[in-house]
Amino acid sequence: MTTGELQPTEQVAPATRWKDFRAGFIAIMPIWLGSIPFGAIYAVSALNAGLTPAQTLAMSLLVFGGAAQFTAVGLFAAGATPLTIIITTLIINMRHMLLAASIAPYIQRSAAWLKGVQAFFLTDESYAVALRRFLEGGGSPAYQLGVNISLYLTWQWSTVAGILLGSIIPDPAAYGLELIFPLTFIGLIVPLLRKRTNVLVAALSGALAIIGALTIPGSWYILIAGIVASGVGAWITRSPAMKREA
Amino acid sequence: MSTWLTILGMACVTYVTRATMLLVLRNEMAPWLRRWLDYVPVAVFAALILPQLLLRKQGDTQMLVLGPAIPAGIVAALVSWRTNNILLTILAGLLVFWGLRWLGM
């Protein structure tokens, strides 16, 4: 993979920054499709689990992670201890460390405060959309911020919609809408599969994840499959002969 | 009160997972690490996708289920390959899923 142009933000004209921000904001709009129903249904299940509207919104504002929020709500409903909920959240979100590490080279020249801000908004989807742009060579911190804010705002107002509309919102699971997540991820990953080693890494990781999910409790399997399969990819491409092919 | 503290704790651990690597990896990375990280997106997303298509949660354990989600995923992948369009990918997958479910799969 090629490294995108690393642009120091300091030298970018505000007009360009605004254009990039808008482009990022728009680029992730298709993914709103998945966020809106689930932001709303998260809110409904959080209220049902006994959280107040303020707590329900606060979790979306502060945690901003669908998988972790849904799991936490289930745990709240089951009367789990705070420590259990916090540790479960940590395990679910551990994969962010991998994603953050992989996008770090592209924003190395950003100021620390900006990295800190971007980090707050890092999700699977926003990461993938921003990274894709970096890989194409057109990425910038402003673009990434546009992607981030776009998805963040959507998650917030769909949470609010869920709080206000409550139980008149149908359960997305009844329509198989939970399938939107893997389908979105497919749309994000398949363009990367034109590289042969990427296909191999994806196949290996998928197989490890299935085996892991069936045998290891919790969601550790995502982290394990991710580390092992990407490591194997790097190991395979270490020799010059393979590198050319990949 | 404990609910608020729990939410705060969730926010803190989540932020740590998001920020650590962005703030720590600041200098030029070793080539092997860089190459490793280049494979992270495909690896992580494959690990997120396949279990969601092939497994169903039954109580506390996961079970292998061959249902309409699998052809839906395959069609979505083909559409994504041809069009590179996320919206079309999602819609194609959902249509196949609904169609097969309507047919009783």
Image (cartoon, rainbow, N blue to C red):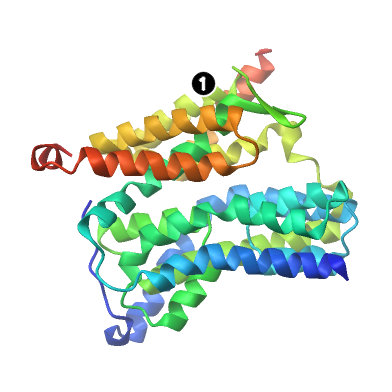
Q: Chain of mark 1?
A: B
Vertical placement of A85 versus B42: above or below? below
Residue B86, given in percent of the width and then of the height, sits at 45, 44
* Residue extending furthest toward the top: B104
Dividing the picture into quadrants, the one containing residue B2 is: bottom right
Question: For this rendering, which residue is in front, A188 or A79?
Answer: A79
Say what secondary structure mark 1 lies in.
helix
Residue A10, given in percent of the width and then of the height, sits at 31, 87
Vertical placement of A232 versus A144: above or below? above
Residue A141, given in percent of the width and then of the height, sits at 38, 72
Residue A161, given in percent of the width and then of the height, sits at 77, 59
Residue at the spot x=53%, y=28% of the render?
A210
Left or right: B86, with B62 as reference point: left
Left or right: A246, with A105 as reference point: left
Residue type at mark 1: give it: Pro
Question: For this rendering, which residue is in front, B14 or B56?
Answer: B14
Dividing the picture into quadrants, the one containing residue A65 is: bottom right
Left or right: A124, with A80 as reference point: left
> Pointer 1: what residue?
B71
Residue at the spot x=60%, y=20% of the render?
B68
Q: Is residue B26 visible?
A: yes
